[in-house]
Each structure stands twice: as structure tokens, then as C-alpha cells.
Image (tube, rainbow, N blue to C red):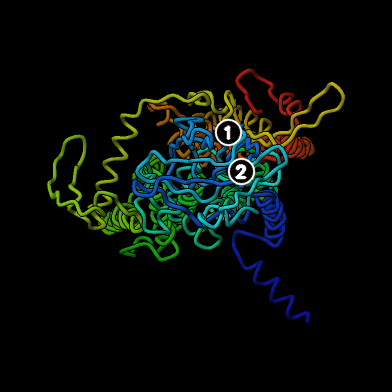
């Protein structure tokens, strides 16, 4: 038995980077975040059987068997959004249909949409005015709860999953899509069912990951959020390892581990079905490999082998290869991965310029072309495999190619490369020409200050009445940073820039270039942008905070107790804001009390 435990200990301590203490701390923080991120992540069920309305089959007639009061119709919409219907009731006296509402818009996919009826009737007519509409479930409610029609058997797909209707007074993020999930969950479903893809304004790999989660766990809130939650969990050890590699200190790495575990933005992005957590993960991974490569290559240059080797050894070049592959996955997820590519190119270029490998440069150039251009292009292209295009599917014969506002390839070309080029050209033009505003948009320079939060969901759960006082209990999900961490990062970022320019410190230079590469491009973006776009830069700001803490401790080791107090304050602040970033039901009064500034709309 002692030998067995010694083997386990040996396995965890043979790493040159991590000690047994590091593994233990990483495990504690990762388990803690796993519990937090999967806590009420979303229901593992949702209506899936669907009824399709077409021009030949657009009328749905509901018979309640007797005259009753119907207050609302709740529609769980399929993968086609913004479906319009006309609602009417049959007058048995006149023998005519009387219109209740001539045009009702059912907006959001994979979500319960409420339609007001408030009518006493027996027969209800629902006519789809679109050429195609997909409804997964209908639920009617009256003064005493759910009302069941007597002719359910005529529309079995619409009334076979009544038990999936929310048991609370209203639906929340637990029951369906929220914010941009209406695009990504829908596209994940379409990938899995070989349907034309709706979301084409970003590369496809991130949506491939979302589709994988839905393939495993189903088309339900848990399924479409699972992969983002998984990558959010993996972020904790990734950031810890990055800090340990950079600062060689378990305590400093632990500080970064606490920052990422209890940052509100990282938490929210890990619980919502969008691609931002994926691209941030691959960006950080690529920079970790670049940092390790730079360190390893500098050490290699000091050896005798460098002068006689025609190419760096495997332990050096593999780090550079993994950096390029990680960058490829970042770009294949979101074009902001290109920003990372620029930063990596600057760092690599500066390193090669100052450590010129005269007898190796030709092979290194070919190697970089392979792993920073060719392989990323392959990764990017392969991400388009699941995408189905509507025009190509309809059998378009257009095989023209033009070069107006990008490369325009006719849909007669149906191959993978044609599909990739066509969509890439479209997405670049889309973002370049997009003119839109949003109530929660915010300028890039305001992000570190958390000037404007972003509300992803805000649903009434129930009302509690006590005497003359009514308390509204709501479920809210907001994008915002942890104020303790984000605001404290601002002077730390400035300090690291000072160390770069004043001390010519290599680590400071690395962090500043990485930070700027992810941040500066946003100042030139004219479309509406949001605070969550700052996450990749904020991750480097966390490492800058670690850099600052290291220097403070070197100046005065007794200041460690203040660092402990700071970490405790950051954790407390996370739980103070937890109800308004997690969707956990809380009162309007509590949410309002957290709106410290006029631009914070949390409830």
C-alpha cells in the first residue's frame, strides 16, 4: 500500500512546473467552480417533438369542449424564430370566426413565448401566416392553471409534453434560451439535424462544440450550455498553470486561480450558450504555449547544441507548434482570434529578431508557415463541415466568381472550401457594414471600469404579498466583472506597462503586448460592442495583477496578509452579486440595491 501511494505522489510531483501543492490547490478551485457553474445550469428537458405548419397545413383548431376562460397561450417555439399567427374564436351563434388578434409575433426559439388571449370561448383558431412554422408545444392556461383541449389527439405533437411547462409562475433561463442563445442553440440544433445554418456571422468551430453538447445531452438548456460550462471549468487550471509557469510561485498562481474562479464575467460566460468562452480559452492557451516556447528557446540558445543543430529540439519546437494549433482553434471559433495572432506574431518576431537563429531561420520560417498559416486554415475550414447552406441545398447552379466586396462564389460550388470562403467573405462584410444600436452597448474604453453592465435575462418568478407590500421575485442574469478584481486591475495594468518601459522587463512586455492585442482593435470597431468583449484582455489583466502582487511581496513580505484580505474581499463580492449573475431568484429590492451607478441595470 505505501508503494501505491508513493507511485501516485511520484506521478503528481514529476512535473517540472507543478508541485503536489499546486495540484491540490487547482483541484479545490476547479471543484469549487464546477459546483458553482453547474448549479442550476438549466433544465435537462425541453419539448422536442414538433408540429410543422405549412401553406397547405396552416390552420390549428382547438376545441375545449365547453365555454371556458383562456388567459394565455404558451408556445415553445422550434428552430424558426419570429413566427406570426392570427388568433380567432368561433361564434356558434353567427357561425363566423371572430378575430381576437390578427397578428401575433412568436419571437424566440427554444423558449416559452406567451400570447395573451383573455377570452371566454370554446373554439380557438390559430392560423400561421408564415410559409413555415415549427411549434414544439402548446400550453393553455386559465384562472385555475393549465387548460387541456378535448381534441389533443388531433395535434399530438403539440400536447404530448405538457409536463415540461414551467412549474413556477413564469419561465426563466432554466426553461429556455436567453440573450444570444437564440442564435447559437438554434445553429447547434441545425448542425445536428443537417438543416441550413442560421448563425453565419462567426466561424463555425464554436458552434460545433455547442452542437456536440446538444448531441450528448439533447436539445435542452443543459445540453446547449454544457460545453461552455466545461470550458469555463477548464479555464481554472489553465489560468493557474499559466501563472505558475510565468511566476514560478504557488502563492501567486493561487491568487490568479481565485481571480478566475470568482470573476463574475468568467462565471456568466461559462453558463450561457455563446462562443466567447471558447475563443478566450484558445487565446490564453496559445499565449501559454508561446510563453513557454520563448523561455525554452532562450535556454536552448545558451547550449552548445544550438550552434550545431539544424533545427531546435522537439521540446522546443513542439511548444511553438501547439501555439499555432491553439491559435488556429481560436480563429476557427471567432475572428477575434486574429487579434491574438497579431500579438503572437509580434512576440515571436521580436524574439527571433533579438535571438536570430542564422543557421535555422529557413526551416523555422517553413515551420511557422505550416503551423501558423496552413494548419490554422485547415482547422478553420474543417469547422464548416456541419454547416448546410440553404441556397446550395436548393440546387443552385450559379457557378460565377466575382471580387466585389470580397470573394463572391456562386452557390453552384458546394464543396467545403467554397462554403468556407463564401461564409468568411459574408461575415467580414456583415461586421464591417453592420449599423445597429443596443441598450446595453458600451464603448471599449469603459469596460475596465464596468461602466455599463449587460442584462441577458430578467424574468418574474413570483410575487409575494404581505399586507400592502408586494415583493417581486425575479431571475436575472447579467454580464459584469467582479468590481474588486476589475477595478483593482486598472492600476496593476498601468504598473506593468511602467515596468515594461522603465525596467525593460520581458515578462511585462509579454503581458502588455498580449493585453493590447486583444484590446486595442476594439477601439476601431464602429458596430455596437459590449463589455463581455473585454474578457480576453481581462484575463491578461489578472496575470498583470499577479505580476504586481509578486513585486509587492518582494518589496515587503509582510504585505501577504493584505493580499489574503484582498482575495477574501473578491470572493465576498462574487457572492454579493451572485443572485444577479446566476439567475438565482431574488427580490427586486436586492437587485436594485446593487445598482451602484446609473448605467447598471441589474433588475
195 shown above or below 200: below
Q: Can residue 342 be seen in this view?
A: no
Quarter of the figure with residue 320 = bottom left
Where is 225 relative to 452, above or below? below
Instruction: Identify the element where label 1 is drawn.
Output: strand
- The dot on residue 140 is 2
Mark sitting earlier along the chain (2/1):
1
Q: Which residue is drawn at 50% across and 47% down?
A: 284
Q: Where is residue 219 in the image (x, y as percent from the top left)?
A: 52, 55
Q: Which mark is residue 117?
A: 1
Q: Quadrant of residue 436?
A: top left
Q: Is mark 2 on a helix, strand or loop?
A: strand
Q: Position of residue 101 (x, y in %)?
A: 49, 30
What residue lies at 78% left-to-right and 82% top-to-bottom? 1
Residue lying farthest to the top in this orientation: 598
Outermost residue on the right side: it is 467
Image position of 585 (left or right of 322): right
Q: Name the residue rendered at 48%, 59% in the picture.
A: 212
| Residue 294 vs residue 33, the one in the foreground | 33
**Mark 2, other Cα within 10 Å: few <14 / some 14–19 / many ≥20:** some
Amino acid at each position: 500500500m505505501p508503494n501505491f501511494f508513493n507511485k501516485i505522489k511520484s506521478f503528481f510531483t514529476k512535473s517540472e512546473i507543478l508541485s503536489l501543492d499546486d495540484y491540490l490547490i487547482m483541484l479545490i478551485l476547479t471543484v469549487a467552480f464546477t459546483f458553482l457553474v453547474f448549479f442550476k445550469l438549466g433544465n435537462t428537458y425541453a419539448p422536442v417533438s414538433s408540429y410543422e405548419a405549412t401553406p397547405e397545413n396552416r390552420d390549428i383548431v382547438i376545441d375545449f369542449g365547453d365555454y371556458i376562460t383562456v388567459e394565455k397561450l404558451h408556445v415553445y417555439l422550434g428552430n424558426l424564430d419570429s413566427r406570426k399567427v392570427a388568433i380567432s374564436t368561433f361564434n356558434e351563434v353567427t357561425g363566423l370566426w371572430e378575430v381576437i388578434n390578427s397578428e401575433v409575433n412568436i419571437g424566440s426559439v427554444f423558449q416559452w413565448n406567451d400570447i395573451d388571449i383573455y377570452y371566454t370561448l370554446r373554439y380557438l383558431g390559430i392560423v400561421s401566416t408564415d410559409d413555415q412554422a415549427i411549434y414544439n408545444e402548446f400550453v393553455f392556461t386559465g384562472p385555475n392553471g393549465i387548460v387541456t383541449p378535448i381534441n389533443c389527439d388531433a395535434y399530438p405533437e403539440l400536447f404530448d409534453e405538457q409536463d415540461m411547462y414551467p412549474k413556477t409562475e413564469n419561465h426563466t433561463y432554466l426553461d429556455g434560451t436567453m440573450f444570444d442563445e437564440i442564435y447559437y442553440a438554434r445553429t447547434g440544433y441545425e448542425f445536428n439535424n443537417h438543416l441550413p445554418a442560421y448563425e453565419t456571422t462567426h466561424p463555425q468551430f464554436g458552434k460545433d462544440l455547442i452542437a456536440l453538447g446538444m448531441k450528448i445531452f439533447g436539445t435542452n438548456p443543459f445540453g446547449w450550455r454544457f460545453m461552455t460550462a466545461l470550458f469555463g471549468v477548464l479555464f481554472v487550471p489553465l489560468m493557474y498553470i499559466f501563472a505558475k509557469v510565468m511566476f514560478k510561485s504557488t502563492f501567486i498562481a493561487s491568487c490568479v486561480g481565485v481571480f478566475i474562479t470568482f470573476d463574475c464575467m468568467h462565471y456568466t460566460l461559462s453558463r450561457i450558450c455563446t462562443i466567447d468562452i471558447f475563443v478566450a480559452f484558445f487565446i490564453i492557451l496559445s499565449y501559454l504555449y508561446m510563453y513557454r516556447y520563448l523561455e525554452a528557446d532562450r535556454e536552448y540558445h545558451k547550449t552548445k547544441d544550438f550552434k550545431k543543430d539544424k533545427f531546435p529540439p522537439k521540446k522546443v519546437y513542439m511548444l511553438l507548434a501547439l501555439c499555432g494549433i491553439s491559435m488556429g482553434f481560436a480563429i476557427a471559433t471567432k475572428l477575434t482570434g486574429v487579434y491574438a495572432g497579431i500579438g503572437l506574431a509580434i512576440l515571436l518576431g521580436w524574439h527571433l529578431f533579438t535571438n536570430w537563429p542564422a543557421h535555422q531561420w529557413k526551416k523555422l520560417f517553413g515551420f511557422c508557415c505550416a503551423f501558423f498559416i496552413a494548419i490554422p486554415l485547415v482547422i478553420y475550414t474543417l469547422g464548416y463541415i456541419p454547416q448546410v447552406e440553404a441556397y446550395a441545398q436548393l440546387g443552385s447552379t450559379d457557378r460565377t466568381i466575382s471580387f466585389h466586396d470580397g470573394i463572391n462564389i456562386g452557390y453552384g460550388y458546394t464543396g467545403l472550401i467554397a462554403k468556407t470562403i463564401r461564409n468568411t467573405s459574408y461575415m467580414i462584410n456583415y461586421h464591417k457594414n453592420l449599423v445597429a444600436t443596443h441598450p446595453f452597448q458600451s464603448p471599449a474604453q469603459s469596460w475596465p471600469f464596468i461602466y455599463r453592465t449587460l442584462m441577458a435575462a430578467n424574468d418574474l418568478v413570483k410575487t409575494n404579498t404581505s399586507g400592502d407590500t408586494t415583493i417581486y421575485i425575479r431571475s436575472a442574469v447579467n454580464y459584469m466583472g467582479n468590481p474588486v478584481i476589475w477595478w483593482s486591475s486598472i492600476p496593476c495594468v498601468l504598473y506593468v506597462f511602467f515596468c515594461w518601459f522603465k525596467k525593460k522587463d520581458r515578462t511585462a512586455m509579454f503581458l502588455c503586448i498580449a493585453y493590447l492585442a486583444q484590446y486595442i482593435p476594439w477601439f476601431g470597431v464602429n458596430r455596437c460592442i459590449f463589455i463581455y468583449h473585454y474578457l480576453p484582455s481581462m484575463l491578461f489583466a489578472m496575470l498583470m495583477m499577479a505580476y504586481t502582487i509578486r513585486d509587492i511581496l518582494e518589496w515587503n513580505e509582510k504585505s501577504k496578509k493584505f493580499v489574503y484580505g484582498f482575495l477574501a474581499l473578491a470572493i465576498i463580492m462574487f457572492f454579493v452579486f451572485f443572485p444577479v449573475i446566476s439567475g438565482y431568484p431574488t427580490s427586486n429590492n436586492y437587485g436594485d440595491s446593487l445598482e451602484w451607478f446609473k448605467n447598471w441595470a441589474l433588475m
